Image (cartoon, helix red, strand yellow):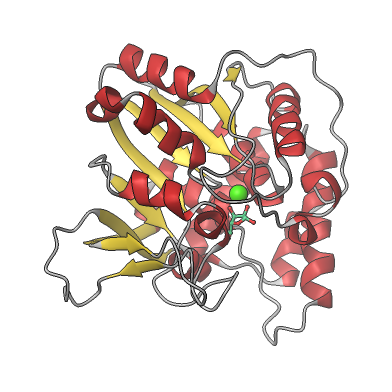
Amino acid sequence: MLKRPIIIDTDPGVDDTIAIMLAKSHPELDIKAITPVTGNVPYSSTSQNALRLAKYLNIDCKVAIGADKPLFIESKTAGDIHGEGGLGGYILPSSDKDFEGYAWDVIKEEAIKANGELEIITLGPLTNIAITFLRYPEIKPLIKRIVCMGGSTYAGNMNAYAEFNIWVDPDACDIVFNSGVPITMCGLDGTEYAYLTIDELKGYIGKNTKIKDLFDHIFNFFIERRTASTDDDKLQVIYDAITMAYFINPNIGKTKKYRVDVETKGSLCAGRTIVDLFNKTKKEPNVDVLLWSDRDLFKDMLNKMLDFYK
Ligand code: BDR
Ligand code: CA
């Protein structure tokens, strides 16, 4: 089988964890490295979660040291969304695995080894990727593409217009989106089509799999949060897992290329991705934007994932 060499850049995170479970269940993906970054919870937790997840899921890859703060601004986290430690209070067994090198060096090495075939999926702030491009601009042509969970075409989840991953490090996003590397942005509105209801979440729980403990814990965490939510619809969107599903199978989504710029500063909407839907800037489009995702296909992929872990 021709395998796809990939790197998962992530800030685990409950939805990152489901995304990494999904990646491991697709043997056509050759996971070369996991590169943690600060984000959902402080770097001390995201990095340990990455090491421990690699061990828990039996992923034979490097885990590299990533950025413990954004490029130019103060760290901001979202612990309230992801619970204590980032995994909804779940403590993974400790891992004898250790960090191997720095994220930017590992990305560079793997890009050279893969000779133009390396794909990167980012599930957190884009700091590690921006540092890679600042240090090693010569490797940009060697990256086949980046699929990024982040941004939004319309509304945000941190201020009226900014999405969390971009809001944490807008300067990093600016560097990556202007790098010339092919990019797909899976933002809030594009992924939200593949929502799960509380009853659907319940339907995935209790399956006899090797990942039952952690998977059920996270899905129960989602159910608790959705039940307590004041949103009328109480729907759960597992943003990172939907992005991974699209990365694995592009039939799950529809994209269109637009000019996308990032509001790096500003008192009202710093971190906003500005998608030029009507080509007002007349600038060259630079980002494929996910406009829609297939809910049924996503649900099916989750079921097949659980079958893999039986
Ligand atoms: C993104 O922010 C994080 O909290 C999630 O893990 C996801 O990557 C959604 O805005
Ligand atoms: Ca994430």
* Residue 222 seen anywhere in this rendered image of the structure: yes
- 21 lies above or below 295: above
Residue placed at 56% from the left, 51% from the top?
Answer: 73
Residue 249 percent location from the top left of the image = 40, 45
Q: Say which quadrant the N terminus sits in.
A: top left
Q: Say which quadrant the C terminus sits in.
A: top right
Residue placed at 66% from the left, 74% from the top?
Answer: 235
Residue 27 percent location from the top left of the image = 50, 26
- 65 lies above or below 153: above
- 37 lies above or below 64: below
In the shown orientation, is residue 184 left or right of residue 6?
left
Residue 141 percent location from the top left of the image = 22, 28
In the shown orientation, is residue 100 left or right of residue 292?
right
Q: Quadrant of residue 107?
A: top left
Residue 250 percent location from the top left of the image = 35, 49
Q: Quadrant of residue 67?
A: top right
Residue placed at 44% from the left, 67% from the top?
Answer: 272
- 250 lies above or below 195: above
* Residue 310 seen anywhere in this rendered image of the structure: no
